[in-house]
Amino acid sequence: MLKTTKSVLLGLFAGIALTMTASAQIGGSGWSSQSISYNVQKPYNVSTSSRFTDSNGVYHCWVYSTDASFQDGSTTLPRTEMRFNPDFTSGEIQYQAMLMAPANENSYCIMQDHTGDSQSSQYGPVAIMFIWQSKDGGSIWNGYTGHELAKNMGGVWFQLNVDHNIVTHTIKAWINSQQVVSESDNGATDYYFKNGVYEQNISTPSAKMDTYIQNIQEWTSSGKNSGGGSFSGSYELECVASGLAANVKGASTSDDAPVVQYPFGGGSSNAIWTFVATSNGYYQVQNQNSGLDMNVNGASTAKGALITQAPFGSSGDDQWKPSQNSDGSYTLTNLHSGLVLDDPGGSTSSNVQLDQYSSQGGTNQEWDIVSQ
């Protein structure tokens, strides 16, 4: 089995058709770039060079539907994959690469976030798989939910970002910088990434399956604000129950515009908030787009009072104290009312206006505070 260690690839290479420039990783601060190290897993009875090449930084993985498994005696389907090392067991890791697959080839995994071997039997082997299918002009699918993530991708280089936060047990993914996945992982604490070709029985596999990959990069971070409530910079506020982000409706810059929940979608400024310290652990939570603060409408102290935006004032209804929960999420308590930021009824619908409510300990009152 071939083992190769390579430094992070920073640019594209001359002479490659249809390439596009890969940008920096999606979202966050405090990232540390990681070197790229991998093993090649390929059919056990053929040479590595007959199923895998590295030509000027463009990796080509392929198998045939008649190929053997990667280990003698294994019942798994044919694969040629780059298995990245080491496993990640804490914090947050983000994978980014440029990939391309032929439009007429079908039914194989091009990238997967795999459970560590020691935990696979308990939690299941894979947290998420990205499946290539020939329909819709070459399309990418979430292998476990069955949702189509992108279409008309055949023969086109595209950028895939996969972010796995073990602290919050969440996985997010972007294709060409558009967020297409936000879901919980399978609960394990040991994972590794793989990319390449792994045949699947989702539909009839093609006789040959190819994936081309370049500009592979990885970053790691702590996965959470590490200051125990000391925040600086800009953040997404994502409700644990809904997976949706606090957002000023319609990107309004007006006083009293409602604060709703909505898909984050790659980071529109009306869904990004700056924490400005006041005193005793409280913060103004200031919208990046409008410059106004998240507040309780009318400075109400009633349960169910709605959340809006307004200029900073003196009543304390626009100050919030983040308290970290055991799962790494935060509860945000209002200074004036003593009530907490709440997704009413644990709704998973977009455009539901947030409110304040007495603390009930539910995930609709828990917020992942994600650096941007």
Image: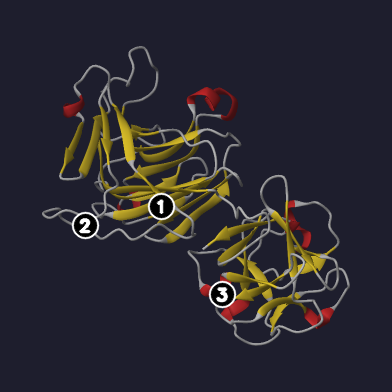
Local crowd at mark 2 within 10 Å, few (<14), some, or many (≥20)? some
Secondary structure found at label 1: strand
Q: Amino acid at mark 1?
A: Asn
Q: Which residue is mark 3?
A: 270
Disc 2 from disc 3: Cα separation = 32 Å
Secondary structure found at label 2: loop
Local crowd at mark 1 within 10 Å, few (<14), some, or many (≥20)? many
Q: Which residue is mark 2?
A: 19
Secondary structure found at label 3: helix
Residue 65, position as x, y percentages in the image: 27, 28
Name the outermost residue toward the front.
279
Disc 3 from disc 1: Cα separation = 22 Å
Q: In this rendering, is residue 348 above or below 1?
A: below
Residue 236, position as x, y percentages in the image: 58, 63
Q: Is residue 196 visible?
A: no
Q: Quadrant of residue 78?
A: top left
Name the outermost residue toward the left.
15
Q: Amino acid at mark 3?
A: Asn
Q: In this rendering, is residue 140 above or below 367?
A: above
Local crowd at mark 3 within 10 Å, few (<14), some, or many (≥20)? many
